[in-house]
Amino acid sequence: MEAWSLNITVSYVLRDDVDLDEAKAGIGAFVDAVGRDHPGVRYVSGQSLSNERAFRHTIRVRSKEELGAMQAQEFFKAFGPWLSSRCAEGPTVDRYGVIAATD
């Protein structure tokens, strides 16, 4: 199996007026779309245990080509503006090259 080559994190805090259940449903639909069509991408979305409005997405990608293919999809292009419009802070994106991993 090919190793993961890139890790990406997306962190943000939702505005106080954003309905958390609606936001989590939108995030879930996005992650479902990633999982359905992009086997070279592992996507995890998490909610902070100390601040219910803070979220972090962790994305593991096998190749830059796989990342590009996902980013070219309409569901991906729509998610960024949808998410940004609900944020009080962020989203901020960081990319990391993999040095070592368990899988």
Image (cartoon, rainbow, N blue to C red):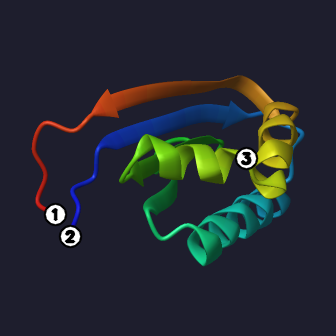
Between 42 and 12, the one lying in front of the other is: 42
Q: Secondary structure at mark 2?
A: loop
The mark that comes first in sequence, 1 or 3, is 3
Q: Is residue 80 left or right of residue 49?
A: right
Q: Residue 45 has which mark? A: none
Between 35 and 1, the one lying in front of the other is: 1
Q: Using a 10 Å C-alpha cutoff, classify the residue at mark 2 as few (fewer than 14 neighbours), some (14 to 19) or many (20 or more).
A: few
Q: Secondary structure at mark 3?
A: loop
Cα distance in 3D space between marks 1 and 2:
9 Å
The mark that comes first in sequence, 1 or 2, is 2
Residue drawn at the location 11% of the way across and 60% of the way down: 102
Q: Residue 72 has which mark? A: 3
Task: Tell me if residue 23 comes above or below residue 68 in the rendering.
Answer: below
Q: Nearer the viewer, mark 1 or mark 2?
A: 2
Q: Amino acid at mark 1?
A: Asp
Q: Is residue 47 visible?
A: no
Residue drawn at the location 41% of the way across and 28% of the way down: 95
Q: Is residue 90 left or right of residue 79?
A: left
Residue drawn at the location 79% of the way across and 47% of the way down: 79
Dot 1 and dot 3 residues touching (CB under 8 Å):
no
Residue hosting label 2: 1
Cα distance in 3D space between marks 1 and 3:
27 Å
Q: Using a 10 Å C-alpha cutoff, classify the residue at mark 1 as few (fewer than 14 neighbours), some (14 to 19) or many (20 or more).
A: few
Task: Tell me if residue 2 comes above or below residue 6 in the rendering.
Answer: below
Residue hosting label 1: 103
The mark that comes first in sequence, 3 or 2, is 2
Residue 38: quadrant of the picture: bottom right
Dot 1 and dot 2 residues touching (CB under 8 Å):
yes
Q: Amino acid at mark 2?
A: Met
Q: Amino acid at mark 3?
A: Ala
